[in-house]
Image: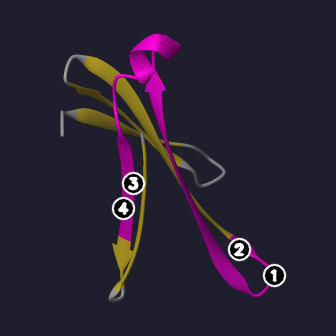
Amino acid sequence: MGHGEWLAFPHGGMKWLFNCFGHYFCLHFEAFQMGTGPVYMAFLGFMGEEFEAKKFAYCVEVAGDGRKLYTECE
């Protein structure tokens, strides 16, 4: 993965902006409390035109405590 920069926001969310294969992407990660337990969200976004975004396949993997969530789309 390319080099990037983490940006932290006051409400607790974090974004990582990075260059990969000459294109820019944004990974947004957020953790918050909902009801009695924590909720985690992650979004991966392509920063560019839709026709360029369709040239890629995307996957996000979040792991911890022996558990793993993996999602992929083309």
Q: Residue at x 44, y 27 (%)?
A: 46
Query: Mark 3 to mark 4: distance in Å?
Result: 4 Å
Marks 4 and 1, how far apart at CA: 25 Å
User: Callout 3: helix, strand or loop?
Assistant: strand
Q: Residues within 10 Å of mark 4 (few under 14, many from 20)?
A: few
Q: Is residue 36 magenta?
A: yes
* Residue at mark 2 to residue at mark 3: CA–CA distance: 22 Å
**Precedes in sequence: disc 2 or disc 4:** 2
Q: Nearer the observer, disc 2 or disc 4?
A: 4
Q: Position of residue 15 (x, y in %)?
A: 46, 41
What is the tally of numbered marks visible in this picture? 4
Tell me which residue sits at (71%, 73%) in the image: 33
Which amino acid type is shown beneath numbered disc 1? Gly
Q: Is residue 65 left or right of residue 32?
A: left
Q: Is residue 68 above or below residue 10?
A: below
Mark sitting earlier along the chain (1/3) = 1
Which span is picked out in magenta? 33-62
Q: Amino acid at mark 2?
A: Gln
Which label number is shown at residue 33? Answer: 2
Residue beneath disc 3: 60
Q: Residues within 10 Å of mark 3 (few under 14, many from 20)?
A: few
